[in-house]
Image (tube, grey):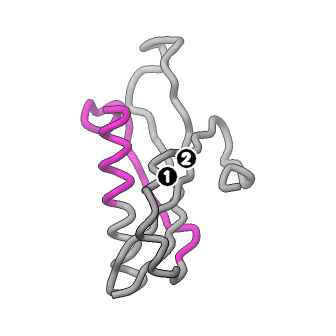
Amino acid sequence: MRCFYVLVHGTLEWECDPEFDDDFFRPSGFHCHRFVLAKGFEDAAEKAFRRVRKNLEKQTGWLGQGLAKLTLEAEELSPAPMRKLLRRADRRHSFYEGERSLSAAD
């Protein structure tokens, strides 16, 4: 088992009517990262995706309510030092609206 860094890009496809609520925040997507303990690269991506999906649902409820569909991709996946697993997890998401922003991952 090794520690991996996974930079995740999530794309949200909204199922709710745009007229639903003008003040309702509908981002196009987000970036976030996770450090995971995994057997290999594929396992690391799957673990990171599960954590991101679970955390997003816990924070927003969008997926469970059927308001949006989520597509995840690993933009960056690399081995990381084991000490990164000891740090407190950063569960934030950097949301963006409109076209995908290349600077959103910074």
Could you say where residue 8 lies in the image, as x and y percent from the top left?
Answer: 51, 60
Could you say where residue 85 lies in the image, as x and y percent from the top left?
Answer: 42, 70
Mark 1: which secondary structure? strand
Within the magenta stretch, is there residue 22?
A: no
Dot 2: within a 10 Å radius of its alpha carbon, few (fewer than 14), some, or many (20 or more) residues?
many
Read off the residue under disc 1.
10
Question: 98 or 80, which lies in front?
Answer: 80
Q: Earlier in the sequence, mark 2 or mark 1?
A: 1
Disc 2 marks a residue whose amino acid type is Phe
Mark 2: which secondary structure? strand
Question: 75 or 51, which lies in front?
Answer: 51
Residue 65's place in the image compared with 40, above or below, is above
Q: Quadrant of residue 49?
A: bottom left
In percent of the image, x 58 and y 40: which residue is there?
95
Residue 72's place in the image compared with 91, above or below, is below
In percent of the image, x 66 and y 48: which residue is there?
100
Residue stretch in magenta: 50-77
Dot 1: within a 10 Å radius of its alpha carbon, few (fewer than 14), some, or many (20 or more) residues?
many
> Which quadrant would the C terminus be assigned to in this image?
bottom right
Within the magenta stretch, is there residue 55?
A: yes
> Are the residues at dot 2 and dot 1 in contact (C-beta closer than 8 Å)?
yes
In percent of the image, x 45 and y 40: which residue is there?
13
Residue 2's place in the image compared with 26, above or below, is below
Disc 1 marks a residue whose amino acid type is Gly
> Which quadrant would the N terminus be assigned to in this image?
bottom left
Residue 68's place in the image compared with 48, above or below, is above
Question: Can you name the residue that lies furthest to the left here?
Answer: 64
Read off the residue under disc 2.
30
